[in-house]
C-alpha cells in the first residue's frame, strides 16, 4: 500500500537508543561485580573481550550528557545481574545498586526515560556452574534478582524488559558466548532451559504488575519476518515452520499463555520437548505482558530442507544461518544488499514484521534494537562520516512510519546502539553507535567520545518527531 498521507509518530513517542551492560560498561570485576558467563567465554582470536568495553561504568555521566544533547527521550540499557548479586543469588552488592541508581537518576534529570532490560545474555557464572537455566533454582534466582530491581528502582522505572533475545540464546547461544558448544548441541536440554526461562519470565511479569502498578513490562525477543525463497509450496511451508520456531514460540507463550503448536510438534518430532511441571502452564498464563519489545535487524529467507539429519550452525556466515532436517534451510535473499558484515538489509521487511506482530498480538510494540554494524573510520578533525548508517536508519524509520499509518501501535524506536560498544562476537571494530569511542580491538587509546555524523542526523530526526530526514 502506498499511502498518500502518512500518520505522524504519536505524541510521547520513545525516540531512544540501546546498549547492554556487558557490551558497554567495562569494569568487569570492579566494585564487587562477580563473573558472568560472558566473562568466562572464549571469543574469536583478535577480537576484543568485554573487560573495558566502552568504559561506560566510569564515564556514564559524560555519556548521558551526550544522549541528552542528541535529544534522546529514552535510553534502553541492561542491568548486569552480577553487579547486584555477584554469585547470582545471596547477598545484595550495594555498590551495584548504587551504580544503577545513579545512572537512572542521571537519566531522569536529563528527561530521558529509562527502559531497563533485566537480563541481557550475562547469566552469573556461579549459576551456570550449577546447571544454568537447566536447574530450576535459576528460576528462583532470577525472580529474586528482578524483585530486588523492582524494590530499588520500581518507583523510577516505567518500562521493564524481561529477557533479551531468548530466541537467539537458544538458536545461537554458543556464538554469543552464553553457553558452550556442548550445551548448544544438546537440543533437548536447550529446550528445557528455554521452558524454564518462560516460567521465570512469567513469574517476573506477574510480580512487576503487583509491585510496580505504574510500570509496564514485556519480553524482548529478536523478531523478523521469514520469507520463502520461492513460491514453491514446500518453501512456503518451510518459512512457516521457521516462523513458528524462531518467532512465535517466544511470543505465543507470554501473550497467549500456551506453546505454539507448530513449534511444539517440531520439538516432539525431534525429541526436544521439555518436561513441563504441573503448574508451569498456569504460571505462564498468569504473566501477560503490557507490550512487546523486539529487536529487528533483517529478515530471513528459507527453503525446504532437502537433507537427512543435517544440522548446520555456522559462525562463519550470518549468525542466523541454520538448517534442520526436514524443517527449513536458511538461504540468502538475492534481492537484498548486505552490510560489511554480511547481514542483509531489509527496511520493507521491518514494516512487514511490524504488521505481522500487530495482527498476531494486537499489543503496543517497542523496537528495542535496529541498526547497522560497520567498520567506521575516524577522519582528520575528529569526523566520522557514517552516511551508510544514516541511510539504514532513515529507511527503517520511513517504514516504521508507514507501519504506523497501516495501524500498527508503535510506541518507541531504540536503535542499536547509543554509543559504540563491543559486538557479541565480532569485536569492537564492528561499530553501531551514534557516538564513536576511540579505541580498537586491543589498543584502548584514550576512549574519548566523538559525535558521528549520524549523531547530528538523529538529533534532527528526534527534534522533528521523525518528520525531517
Ligand atoms: C542483538 C543483541 O542480537 O544484536 C545485541 O541483543 C547485539 O547484544 C546486537 O550486540 C548486534 O549483534 P552483534 O553480533 O553484531 O553484536
Image (cartoon, rainbow, N blue to C red):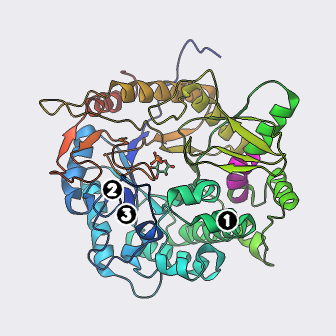
The alpha-carbon separation of the residues under discs 3 and 2 comes to 22 Å
Secondary structure of the residue carrying tag 2 is helix
- Provide the major secondary structure of the magenta segment: helix
Q: Is residue 246 inside the magenta stretch?
A: yes
Question: Residue drawn 32% across and 42% down?
Answer: 72
Question: Residue drawn 82% across and 58% down?
Answer: 264
In the image, residue 12 sits, relative to residue 170, either above or below, namely above
State the quadrant of the N terminus.
top right
The alpha-carbon separation of the residues under discs 3 and 1 comes to 30 Å
Asked whether mark 3 and ligand 1 are closer than 8 Å, the reply comes as: no
Question: Residue drawn 41% across and 79% down?
Answer: 85
Q: Earlier in the sequence, mark 3 or mark 1?
A: 3
Q: Earlier in the sequence, mark 1 or mark 2?
A: 2
Verify CB contact (< 8 Å) between mark 1 and mark 2.
no
| Res 286 seen here | no
Which numbered dot is residue 114? none
Please state which of the two labelled residues, at mark 3 or mark 1, is closer to the viewer: 1
Which numbered dot is residue 24? 2
Secondary structure of the residue carrying tag 1 is helix
State the quadrant of the C terminus.
top left
The alpha-carbon separation of the residues under discs 1 and 2 comes to 26 Å
Give the residue number, with chain letter if any, for mark 3. 156
**Residue lying at the far left of the rendered structure:** 381
Q: Earlier in the sequence, mark 3 or mark 2?
A: 2
Residue 413 coordinates in the image, percent (x, y): 46, 40
Magenta segment: 243-253
Residue 58 coordinates in the image, percent (x, y): 21, 62
**Residue lying at the far bottom of the rendered structure:** 90
Q: Out of 97 and 244, give the one closest to the viewer.
A: 244
Residue 463 coordinates in the image, percent (x, y): 31, 31
Give the residue number, with chain letter if any, for mark 1. 194
Question: Residue drawn 53% across and 26% down?
Answer: 399
Amino acid at each position: 500500500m502506498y499511502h498518500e498521507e502518512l500518520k505522524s509518530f504519536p505524541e510521547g513517542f520513545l525516540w531512544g537508543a540501546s546498549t547492554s551492560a556487558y557490551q558497554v560498561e567495562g569494569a568487569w570485576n570492579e566494585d564487587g561485580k562477580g563473573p558472568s558467563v560472558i566473562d568466562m567465554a572464549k571469543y574469536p582470536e583478535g577480537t576484543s573481550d568485554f573487560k573495558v568495553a566502552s568504559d561506560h561504568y566510569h564515564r556514564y555521566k559524560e555519556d548521558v550528557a551526550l544522549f541528552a544533547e542528541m535529544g534522546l527521550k529514552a535510553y534502553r540499557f541492561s542491568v548486569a545481574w552480577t553487579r547486584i548479586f555477584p554469585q547470582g543469588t545471596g547477598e545484595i552488592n550495594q555498590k551495584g545498586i548504587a551504580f544503577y541508581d545513579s545512572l537512572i537518576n542521571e537519566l531522569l534529570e536529563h528527561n530521558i526515560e529509562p527502559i531497563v532490560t533485566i537480563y541481557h545474555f550475562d547469566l552469573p557464572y556461579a549459576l551456570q556452574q550449577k546447571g544454568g537455566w537447566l536447574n530450576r533454582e535459576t528460576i528462583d534466582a532470577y525472580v529474586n534478582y528482578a524483585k530486588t530491581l523492582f524494590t530499588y528502582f520500581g518507583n523510577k522505572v516505567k518500562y521493564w524488559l524481561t529477557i533479551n533475545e531468548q530466541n537467539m540464546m537458544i538458536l545461537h547461544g554458543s556464538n554469543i558466548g552464553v553457553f558452550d558448544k556442548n550445551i548448544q548441541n544438546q537440543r533437548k536440554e536447550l529446550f528445557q532451559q528455554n521452558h524454564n526461562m518462560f516460567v521465570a519470565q512469567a513469574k517476573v511479569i506477574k510480580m512487576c504488575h503487583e509491585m510496580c502498578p505504574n510500570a509496564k513490562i514485556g519480553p524482548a525477543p529478536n523478531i523478523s519476518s521469514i520469507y520463502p525463497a520461492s513460491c514453491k509450496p514446500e518453501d512456503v511451508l518451510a518459512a512457516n515452520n521457521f516462523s513458528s520456531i524462531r518467532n512465535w514460540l517466544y511470543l505465543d507463550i507470554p501473550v497467549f499463555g500456551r506453546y505454539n503448536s507448530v513449534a511444539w510438534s517440531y520439538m516432539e518430532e525431534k525429541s526436544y520437548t521439555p518436561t513441563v511441571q504441573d503448574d508451569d502452564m498456569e504460571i505462564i498464563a498468569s504473566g501477560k505482558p503490557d507490550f512487546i519489545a523486539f529487536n529487528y535487524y533483517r529478515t530471513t529467507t528459507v527453503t525446504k530442507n532437502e537433507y537427512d539429519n543435517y544440522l548446520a550452525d555456522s559462525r562463519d556466515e550470518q549468525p542466523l544461518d541454520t538448517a534442520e532436517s526436514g524443517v527449513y534451510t536458511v538461504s540468502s535473499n538475492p534481492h537484498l544488499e548486505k552490510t560489511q558484515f554480511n547481514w542483509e538489509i531489509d527496511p520493507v521487511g521491518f514494516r512487514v514484521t511490524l504488521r505481522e506482530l500487530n495482527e498476531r498480538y494486537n499489543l503496543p510494540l517497542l523496537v528495542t534494537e535496529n541498526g547497522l554494524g560497520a567498520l567506521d573510520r575516524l577522519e582528520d578533525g575528529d569526523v566520522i562520516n557514517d552516511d551508510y548508517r544514516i541511510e539504514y536508519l532513515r529507511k527503517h524509520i520511513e517504514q516504521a512510519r508507514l507501519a504506523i499509518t497501516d495501524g500498527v501501535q508503535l510506541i518507541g524506536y531504540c536503535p542499536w546502539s547509543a554509543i559504540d560498544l563491543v559486538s557479541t562476537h565480532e569485536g569492537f571494530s564492528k561499530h553501531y553507535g551514534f557516538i564513536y569511542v576511540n579505541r580498537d580491538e586491543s589498543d584502548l587509546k584514550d576512549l574519548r567520545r566523538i559525535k558521528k555524523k549520524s549523531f547530528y542526523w538523529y538529533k534532527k530526526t528526534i527534534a522533528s518527531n521523525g518528520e525531517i530526514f
